[in-house]
Image (spheres, grey):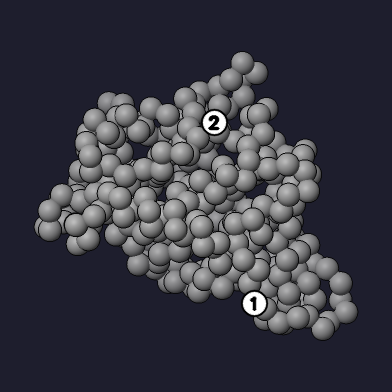
Amino acid sequence: AFLRALTELSALAEHKGTVRVRLVDNGFFANWLQVLDAAYFANAAARLEPDWIITGKEREFNYGSPSEDVFHALFHPFSQSASTASTGYFDVTHRFNFLLINVFRGQFLRGSQATRRRLEYSSVAQRVFQVKPHLLARREEILRCRRAGVENCPVIGVHKRVDNPGTARMQLEQRMLQIGCYIQAVRKVAKGYEQGSPWIFLATDDADAVPEFRKAFGDRLICNLTAKRSAGGINEKKLPLEVHGQEERLSIADAEDCLLDALLLSACDAFIHADSNLTIAAGILNPHAAAHHVRDLVDLAERNAE
């Protein structure tokens, strides 16, 4: 598999025709990162085509109805040179950077080279993901309604995934920390700010997280109230229970809410995260925000107490 990936990567770097980034039946930001990774490694002369057109057969990436183009519903076409090469299509069906894949992804935002990685991918993301104005306006509205008159107050972001066998399996430690650990982590980060109590932005698909954070932080909590959330665990078919991947299809509006959470996290001064594609995206969109892995903030005794 490693040699095959290297062979494909070499071919991608040399291809000067059209690079078609195929939709994979996975979460929203797995596909976002796949487009970004392809753009990062592609030849400068190539033309990139994200293919997020819904067939209706998707289970995980089930945003919208058949024939809807999810990518261009959210992003403007980005400027690029028209390929003059007659070498046909090169199809990208996976990510190449191992730090963007499965359990390894928890290391992307950590380590001595994390800032360099974020900056390099950020320059590509700014070119490729030109978000539609109505989504940027929604981001500003959510932040403005809670920050009026306190523009200098810092904002700490938190991404808390719902707990189910699927999300736990994608963590390096093979389990999700519970809500209380995230609240303790926020309090530790907040102590580092001297200019008053920070605002807390919570991005979550966990239905229990919002009331628990509201209890802990009161009216200093910011969140996207329109986003769908789930109780977690497993459903009647013994499958992981979460917002996507269920029998009921989602809409383009649900994809917008997913993207909006990353845009909001990227507007924070710092954010707390587990192993997640969404928080990698937020860290790339704002490579200067301080990224804190929740396990680095919560000691072993606190984890085991949950």
Answer whether residue 301 is visible to the viewer in this image.
no
Q: Position of residue 34 (x, y in %)?
A: 63, 58
Q: Position of residue 192 (x, y in %)?
A: 16, 55
Q: Is residue 228 above or below residue 140?
A: above
Dot 1 amino acid type: Ser
Return the residue nearer the eye: 43 or 210: 210
Q: Is residue 219 above or below residue 144?
A: above
Q: Is residue 57 left or right of residue 222?
A: right
Give the residue pinned by disc 2.
242
Query: Residue sitting at 55 percent across and 33 percent down?
Result: 243
Dot 2 amino acid type: Glu
Which quadrant of the structure image shows residue 115?
bottom left
Give the residue pinned by disc 1.
79
Callout 1 secondary element: loop
Mark in the foreground, 1 or 2:
1
What is the spatial separation of the Cα atoms under label 1 and label 2, in whole angstroms? 36 Å
Q: Position of residue 201 (x, y in %)?
A: 32, 47
Query: Residue sitting at 41 percent across and 43 percent down?
Result: 224
Query: Residue sitting at 82 percent across and 83 percent down?
Result: 84
Query: Residue sitting at 67 percent across and 40 percent down?
Result: 62
